[in-house]
Image (tube, rainbow, N blue to C red):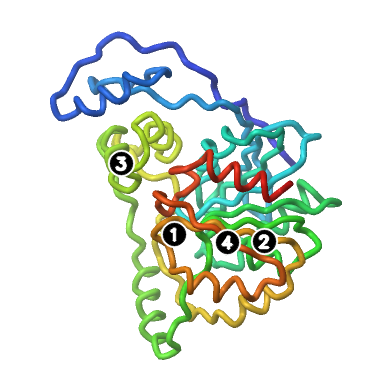
Amino acid sequence: MVFHRAAEAGPRDIYQAGIRLVPALSRWLRLAMSRAGPLVPFCGDLPAIAEYIPARHSDLEMVSIRGLALAVRVWGKMDAPRIVMLHGGRDSSITFQFLVDELAGEWQVIAPDWRGHGESAWAAGNYWFQDYIADLDALLEHYSPDQPVCLIGHSLGGNVANVYSGVRPHRISRLVSLDGFGIPPDDPSSAPERISTWLDAVRSVQSSRSYPDLLAAVERLEHAHPRLDPARLVFLARHWVVANEDGGFRWRFDPKHWISFPTVHHFADWAACFARVTAPVLWLASENTHSTEFIADRLRHFPVARFERLADTGHNLHHDAPAAVARMIEAFLG
């Protein structure tokens, strides 16, 4: 069963009263006020900051998948060609807003919040890589039971997409991975220590860090995403945090996602999946990700695949260069 929420709000009334310049925030305000957009009040007497206005608005649906309520963000019309986008770890579907806004064509973009992320329900136990694969399989059965889809994933989402496309090759027409190229194989001798570390972590899960106000969360995002302007940082922060009972804010994901998997990674398992992919594959790499040699060694396991690297981008290349990423994706889709 699907429950529909209202579409994302459009431009809001401009917040004009109570703007108070704080010297430490003057750079933020100069940049924010220089860009068109609504002004979003922060908490208490903190100043207002201009926020990014989406060009394309989305609906958020709640879908029951494998016993959990998963939030699924949908842009575009039902009769448009379909793209499924999968976000990375400790992220959410709204991460693709800038990319969707830069798409030249008319597409229906479907992007779930993974279990324990964003608006989706948290799992009672721990999270496993195979859970994401099973959730994706169920989501495709729900949204596109009869037609293959173009699948795009970032980071964790890209790794899920790469593996799934070899497990269910008939379900995928095109595959794009954004900085999701797997990890180097683990040394089997590390297994005891990895399991011990995991046991300690699950025994006492740490709470997510709390920020006193939204501006503090924005400043944290600025450190992690130095190429983004304040308007986009504010937009992401507003979607990525949720209010605590103490009046502060925390990130909108289950803190168990900070816990590393206890399993030892064997790339040979993934290589076997890559070899069964029948869809054309495009890997887009950020400037500072794995070496070209590492990527080429992984990519050779796909029957038909290529990769390109985008200059002046960090791991979230769909944030740093959304127009370039959109052009490359649409050129690949044909």
Q: Is residue 72 left or right of residue 245?
A: right
Crowding at mark 2 (Cα within 10 Å: few <14, some 14-19, many 20+): many
Secondary structure of residue under mark 4: strand
> At 67% across and 79% down in the image, what residue appears?
272
Amino acid residing under circle 3: Glu
Earlier along the polypeptide chain: callout 2 or callout 4?
2
Crowding at mark 1 (Cα within 10 Å: few <14, some 14-19, many 20+): some
> At 77% across and 40% down in the image, what residue appears?
81
Earlier along the polypeptide chain: callout 4 or callout 3?
3
- Measuring from the top left, give residue 62's x and y in whole percent: 65, 40
- Measuring from the top left, give residue 118's x and y in whole percent: 50, 44
Crowding at mark 3 (Cα within 10 Å: few <14, some 14-19, many 20+): some
Secondary structure of residue under mark 2: strand
How far apart marks 1 and 4 lie (CA) works out to 29 Å
Crowding at mark 4 (Cα within 10 Å: few <14, some 14-19, many 20+): some
Q: Tell me the residue that label 1 is attached to.
A: 257
Q: Tell me the residue that label 2 is attached to.
A: 281
Amino acid residing under circle 1: His
Earlier along the polypeptide chain: callout 1 or callout 4?
1
Q: Which mark is residue 222?
A: 3
Secondary structure of residue under mark 3: helix
Q: Which of 30/138 is in front?
A: 30
Earlier along the polypeptide chain: callout 2 or callout 3?
3
Q: Nearer the viewer, mark 4 or mark 3?
A: 4
Q: Residue furthest left?
A: 23
> At 71% across and 37% down in the image, what residue appears?
108
Amino acid residing under circle 4: Phe
Q: Which mark is residue 274?
A: none
How far apart marks 4 and 3 lie (CA) works out to 29 Å
Earlier along the polypeptide chain: callout 1 or callout 2?
1
How far apart marks 1 and 2 lie (CA) works out to 28 Å
